[in-house]
Image (cartoon, rainbow, N blue to C red):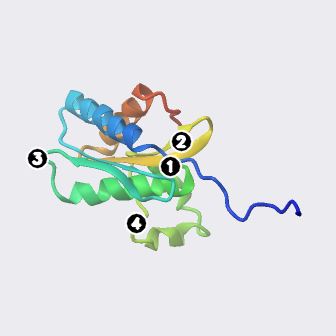
Amino acid sequence: MTNRPANSVATPNISCRAALQLIQAARAAAERLGVDMAIAVTDTGGHLRAFERADHAPFLVAEVAINKAWTAASFGRATHVWNEIVQNPEVTPLNNHPRMTALGGGYPIVENGQVIGGIGISGGSSAQDQQAAEEALREMGFEVGDY
């Protein structure tokens, strides 16, 4: 028998339990801010893991929240940093991707230095969306940064 390298890799992903708890923490942050928000949590592949839209949040914020989480999980970077990144002509074509969202409120979910998903929040200003996401991540013990 020969020792061959594996043809697959194990990818850490946020658990369903943690995704739902993150939604609850983000909802509490949104309520403290007094803003009706949509909150999305994805796994490392950008697939929706948990979602909630406040009763009075506009329906458009649902898609924006999901795309913020997708964007954050895709590159392991907070969405607000993309405004500066896409100014580089070599990266500008990413703006044409239909899911790419360079608005504040999306963060990678990082545990022990590894991205395990993404969170996206939409419904307030970019600053409010960012604040709610950061509060929820900290409450759950996840790392918070722009990356």
Which is nearer the N-term, disc 3 or disc 4? Answer: 3
Whole-angstrom CA distance, mark 3 to mark 4, is 24 Å
Q: Is residue 59 left or right of residue 83?
A: left
Between circles 3 and 1, the one closer to the viewer is 3
Q: Secondary structure at mark 3?
A: loop
Whole-angstrom CA distance, mark 3 to mark 1, is 29 Å
Where does the N terminus fall, quadrant-wise? bottom right
Q: Are marks 1 and 2 in contact (CB under 8 Å)?
A: yes
Which is nearer the N-term, disc 4 or disc 2? Answer: 4
- Dot 1 corresponds to which residue? 81
Q: Where 140 sits versus 121, above or below?
A: above
Picture disc at residue 56: 3
Which is nearer the N-term, disc 3 or disc 1? Answer: 3
- Dot 4 corresponds to which residue? 99
Q: Where 98 sits versus 35, above or below?
A: below
Q: Residue at x 22, y 44 (%)?
A: 37
Between circles 4 and 2, the one closer to the viewer is 4
Whether residue 60 can be seen here: yes
Picture disc at residue 115: none
Instruction: Please name the amino acid that badge 4 sits on.
Output: Arg
Whole-angstrom CA distance, mark 1 to mark 2, is 7 Å
Q: Residue at x 72, y 65 (%)?
A: 7
